[in-house]
Amino acid sequence: MHVLITGGAGFIGSHLTRALLERGDRVAVLDNLSTGSIDNIRAFAHHPLYSFAIDDLRNALVLDRLASQADAIVHLAAAVGVQLVVERPTETIETNVLGTHAVLAAARRYRCRTLLASTSEVYGKGVKAPFAEEDDLLLGASSRSRWSYAASKLLDEFLGLAAHREFDLSVTVVRFFNTVGPGQTGRYGMVVPRFVRAALRNAPIPVYGDGTQSRCFCHVRDTVRAVIDLLDRPEQTAGEIYNIGSRQEVTINQLAQTVIDRTDSQSTIHYIPYSEAYAPGFEDMQRRVPDITKIHNTIGWAPKYTLNQILDDVIEFERPLSVADDTTG
Ligand code: UDP
């Protein structure tokens, strides 16, 4: 298969690129390097089945050329990270909506099988646990910029499902729940790399709010396996939405303590009010647990990695970097 990955230089995109190349697929990456990094894809540079274009999705000519050569498109390019979304809402909305619009238009022209990445953010402030794909969605007020991310990804989902219904395009939507693993940057607010880096430096662990909020962290390798299995099964999965995430729930306090224990760190936990960490009036989600019955029943997928295994993988990846940082000052 020839797969175009938008956002292929990002955290999930680069892991997906590696997995597809390993099984012999041809991969073209399109990424504007806004939040992705050339470091993530350096290793593939000379791979015979790999090509890379540094460009924006909204460059219609480039997207058209790449789509014309592809059998499938995995659309991962999006604004990422709650911090970025709060700081730059206009960029978030435009990147998500206009980017997805452009991808779907190109996919329709060349009849590409398409997989759209969405997010557990779309479940918003719902208090149900676990969240299932057919649940109602409860977003906060539009005056709170956090919700612009969920609203824009939701519009992406609508666009994708509409293209399936109206134009018979093979589109599958996936909702990622807190994907983590080696190579994720903490620059855009992601909690696991931030805690691990702080712990390795014996620096304070910044817990936002009171730390009783919980999440389920899924290893990127599990996530990528789900994406590939869904991509491979268009007949069963076109026109459908799937949650992809772990069922192992942990509070942010427990996460901080586990990271301290597993790195043998001298760090202590520091509590930071949400208003200081993000913006006044910021609303967090107290719980976010995925119902993964649907994907399990359709393709037999379930995550394999435990939280401790995930943390050990991240720690192993970050440890040499933290030593290098200390020696270079
Ligand atoms: N968080 C934290 N300290 C940090 C970054 C995040 O306590 O340095 C909290 C954040 O408020 C949220 C959880 O960790 O409750 C997960 O945050 P992340 O940004 O990783 O993902 P989210 O679930 O918010 O999309």
Image (cartoon, rainbow, N blue to C red):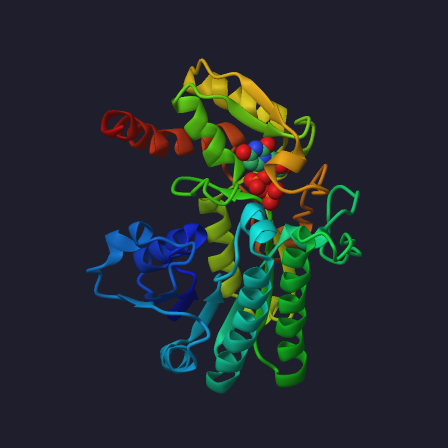
Q: Indicate the quadrant containing the N terminus: top left, top right, bottom left or bottom right.
A: bottom left
Residue 272 appears left or right of 123: left
Residue 164 is situated, as x and y percent measured from the top left of the image, at 63, 77
Looking at the image, which residue is at 46% across and 75% down?
58
Q: Quadrant of ligand 1?
A: top right
Q: Is residue 45 visible?
A: yes
Residue 186 is situated, as x and y percent measured from the top left of the image, at 46, 40
Q: Indicate the quadrant containing the C terminus: top left, top right, bottom left or bottom right.
A: top left
Residue 25 location, quadrant? bottom left
Q: Is residue 216 visible?
A: no
Query: Looking at the image, which is closer to me, 216 or 188?
Result: 188
Looking at the image, which residue is at 24% across and 25% down?
327
Residue 301 appears left or right of 200: right
Using the image, determine if residue 285 lies above or below residue 27.
above
Looking at the image, which residue is at 65% across and 48% down?
292
Query: Looking at the image, which is closer to me, 275 or 159?
Result: 275
Residue 110 appears left or right of 238: left
Residue 105 is situated, as x and y percent measured from the top left of the image, at 53, 81
Looking at the image, which residue is at 67% across and 37% down?
275
